[in-house]
Image (cartoon, rainbow, N blue to C red):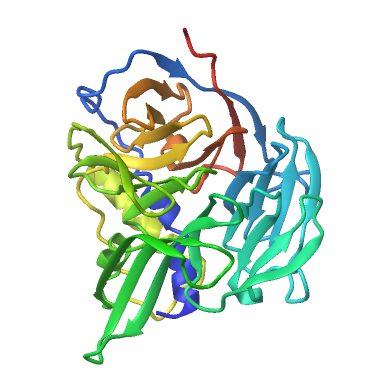
Amino acid sequence: MTLREFVVVGAVFAFAGCGGGAGETSGAESDFAAEQTLELEITGTIGIELGDSNYVLGAVQQIAHDLSGNILVLDRSACCVRVYSPSGEFIRQISNEGSGPGELLNPFAIVVTEDGRILVESPYSGGVHAFTQSGEWLGLVTQISNNPLMNAVGAEGSSYIAMRVVVDVNESGDLEVDAFIGLYEEDEEPARKYWEYVFPYDPNDLTTMLKNSLMGHVFTADRDGNVFIAELTSEQYLVQGFRADGELFLEIEQDADRVEKTQQEMDEEETYVISYLRALGLDGVALQYNPQPCRNTISDVETDGEGRVWVRRGTVQEPVFDVYDYSGEKLFTVSVPGAGEDSTFWEFTIDQFGIIAYSVNPELYQQVYILEMPELQQ
């Protein structure tokens, strides 16, 4: 598979975490209980349909916070990073479209390091670019022209966690896919791998390729180097935590109902994935996608900088998180009431600076949502 094909296919990875379309669900919460049930409130939005170009978002690829708590929006179509205050006011734009020094082409990931640098992966313009918080280009820190890093998230120091999918020839002369989640330290090769799966390359079976790689897992990391990974499956509810050295230290397991997708959900999912790939220019590949019949038990994993793991349920429509400490004890449940059907497609960023989200499949126009965490009851 070429770089372009994997860059395009990787764009649907965010959708995979949603567990399907927007059908009705019942009886999916019977095995979950919590001491407290908290509600997130949407306190602001970034993004308008028409008007000030600083607020008209194109194709949001990823969102993050810088070390001042400002909101970073990586816009793939505009080839830039837009910086907003914690309340949503525009501050500045970092970079622009082009192939010159510090310019971006089809940027794919953004990471904020502990020293404050903003790393932006743009394989078509050389690899991973580094910028200061004020937008000054510091140079290319890692050269990448093939097999781009997917869904990167900042870890300890200047390192980050990412998925990579490599197609190569094995000892028998056959093409095979090597998919893995690894730790990167400003080098093209991973310093460590936390999960890996090697399987035969079959360009005519897009569904299996996506499930075994880009649409197979969600993951996150904290600033102490702890990594949390969950498989996207309807078979089990399991989150594994790894120390920076790769040692398994945590397994969070829950009983969860299997929730079947409606036929409408499956049709919408198939249509969405195929149309999205075509819209991004993927040609010459068999675009036959067969959705799984049941929703994933987990659709996202985040960590908030307070020693807590947020696990989003994939079996319900609106966002619901089960929140655990690092010993695996469940602390409370968090929901976003009134978020609506579109929230099935929301991708969250949760860290020490707050909670933000955006939809990978917006109903009208692209927006970033700013959410507030209520005070915990003592």
State left or right for residue 21 relative to residue 61: left
Give the quadrant of residue 368. Answer: top right
Determine if residue 58 is in view: no
Asked if residue 212 is positioned above or below residue 133 in the image, the reply reads below
The percent coordinates of residue 296 (x first, y second) are 27, 43
State left or right for residue 34 relative to residue 42: left
Point out the residue furthest to the top here: 378
In this rendering, the count of numbered labels is 0
Residue at horizontal 56 percent and vertical 70 percent from the top:
187
In-front residue for pair 370/110: 110
Asked if residue 351 is positioned above or below residue 38 in the image, the reply reads below
State left or right for residue 170 relative to residue 39: left
Residue at horizontal 25 percent and vertical 60 percent from the top:
290
| Quadrant, the N terminus | bottom left
The percent coordinates of residue 43 (x first, y second) are 63, 24
The percent coordinates of residue 353 (x first, y second) are 62, 33
